Amino acid sequence: MTSSQSQTSPQVQILLANANLSQREITQKMLKFYDASFLVDTCGSIQEAVRLAKTHHYDLILADEDIEEGDNFDLLQALQRNKINTPVLMLFSEDDTEKPARAMKLGATDYIKKARGYLTALPFAVKKAIEKARLEQQEAARSGAESIPRQKGYFMLNAQGKFTSVNPGLISLSGFSEDELLELTLLDLIPRHQQWYFFEWLNEVESKATKAPLEIELVGKYGTHVPVMLRLQPAFAEKDQVRGYRGEVEELEFNGRPPNGEALHFQEAQLIDQLWHLMETSREVSFPTLLGRLARLTCQIFKFKRATLAILDRARKAYIKVVMVGYGQPTEKEKRRLEVPKDVIDRIFENRYRIKVLYFEQDRRGRQHALASSMLERRSQRRRPAGQWHPRDIVVINLADRELNSFGYLSLDDPVPDFRANRTFFRTLELFSRLVSMLILNHRFTLEQAQRNRRLMQVLVTSNIFKLYLRLDELLQEIVWSVKFCLDFQLVILGLISQKTRKLEIRAVACDDKIKARQVSELKIDIEDFLTLFRPEFAQGKAYLIKRKHPALAEIKHVYYVDRHESRMPDEWSQAAAIAVPLKSQTGKIIGAIIIDDPVDLEYPDDSRLKTLEILANQISVAIQNRLIYASALKKNMQRRQSPENGGANRMPTSAGETSAEGNGGGFLKRIFKLNS
């Protein structure tokens, strides 16, 4: 290309997004070498690309798959969320076969594969993409100009929404006769899947928060769906009670735009795709890391500058702020505010809302609706008019399970300047609440299961069965701490039945409070009371879950909970509850039990944790029996060596194990098994 040609060519503004500095420089030089009219800006991250695209006019964005904060699909979606309509040319690796088709489906203008020598073809691909985008914009503008309103219909409604007067225009649009319409309500003409949008809009109209019309469909007599622009003007009686409505519908030419339901479906599909991508890329990360990524993604999707994600700590009865995006480092005074009392959040979601908006400096209110909706209101204050969102208004998203039991919340505040809180925004938030709750619960469950499996594997690999060098008390002490380590219970007790005292004697206790552990270890339980722990009504497989006060556990409970008088929710672990698993001999007789209490998460254990406890209990029984066999065999060996026939009447034991064979549990174990033989 000659210099005179380059001087007369219009300038082409290009933004190149690539995390690799050397590749950016090479690509920039190649484009400039081909055509001096190419003005190329570069950036390395999604955030920087969006900022530049907002403040500069670009003819094209070159989006490489190697980019900070994600990939070129994340950049494409970020541009769409920020309503940046600049054409995007995507760059993919040579071996990618599925990504190009996906990129075109999601709205990319074109793509190019980075095969050998692709930089030579890149300038031609840039010009082709710019020309293609220009033709598409012209076609869209031409189609928009041809979309003109058509027929109009006018009507009157009473307070219940029933037609009281209709004009020929509405009769023509609906296909119903005048007599037929006067027996119907406006809701009878609105598709069921769009009634939710209508109720939301009507609430705003009645509260005088908006005068904007609603684009919706009317269902005709023979099932036809006619796109219309609906306007309603309520007539008020005393005390702001609605006594009727004056309405107008204006038919719209179909212009290729999807109706509200389909537009929402597209947004929901994008939302699901983003969360799916987050889940796939966060399988191996820690729980706080996932929450941090989730909070940042939420800000990007819904256009807020700050977000807080908190998780419920049942033991502390507070929501702990795990992630705070957009805030500076907290001062010492502010650190005390990183916990929100549980009852505060419970009051926000007291009517089992999934979304709640807290408007700054507004009192709570209650308002009756003339055309009543079957949907629960998600606010108790008057919604602000569009475009008047206060920076300190807060959107609170409930993170809850299927039964709407909250386990956390996600709050958003300080929206971007062009933020608009419309019906689609709140509808998408409700779907987001469900999907994010499912994602968090699934990730936490996966991590907890992996942790329990690792701990159980560690206990089984370093099995107590083979630790015959330990004294009995040392063996039992190691067992209870292994159980505590595996199952996250704060109190684990191992007791064995004594033939001499006819009581269950506490032989080992695992508890972080050393004083309480010592006091519990001194307790003894009457054998008759102890055996009533294993009634069929308490059975959960081979474990026994006791949820009410029981005489066998009364002294243990008194010692352990003496200084704790906290109220608990019905679904939380009761201070009267405990789990007991019997320890049995080879003949199936009960020789003792392992008792656990006070789970860290205050939740009743699921089947997998109970199965783990059963495995450990079986392990304990085998370990005790092995210790008995070993002690008995060791004693016989010592007696044989010291017998007169072997000339060893005065022979000293040769090992520390021999000196402790009888005094370190052998006699006690014999009494246990003799009792149950």
Image (cartoon, rainbow, N blue to C red):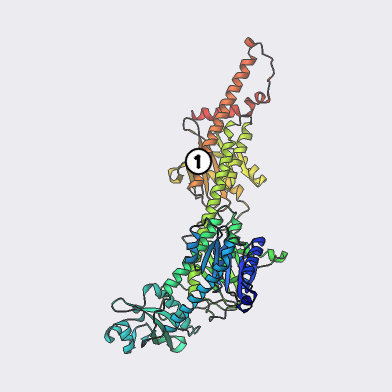
Q: Position of residue 565 (x, y in %)?
A: 60, 56
| Image quarter of residue 479 | top right
| Residue drawn at point x = 52 percent, y = 62 percent | 275
Position of 603 relative to 553 (above/below): below
Q: Position of residue 126 (x, y in %)?
A: 56, 69
Q: Dot 1, crowdedness within 10 Å: few (<14), some or many (≥20)? A: many
Q: Position of residue 20 (x, y in %)?
A: 65, 60
Q: How many numbered markers are drawn?
A: 1
Most foreground residue, 265 or 66: 66
Most foreground residue, 355 or 511: 355
Most foreground residue, 169 or 495: 169
| Residue drawn at point x = 40 percent, y = 74 percent | 194
- In the image: residue 324, left or right of residue 127: right
| Residue drawn at point x = 59 percent, y = 55 percent | 287
| Image quarter of residue 115 | bottom right
Which residue position is annotated with label 1? 614
- In the image: residue 43, left or right of residue 283: right
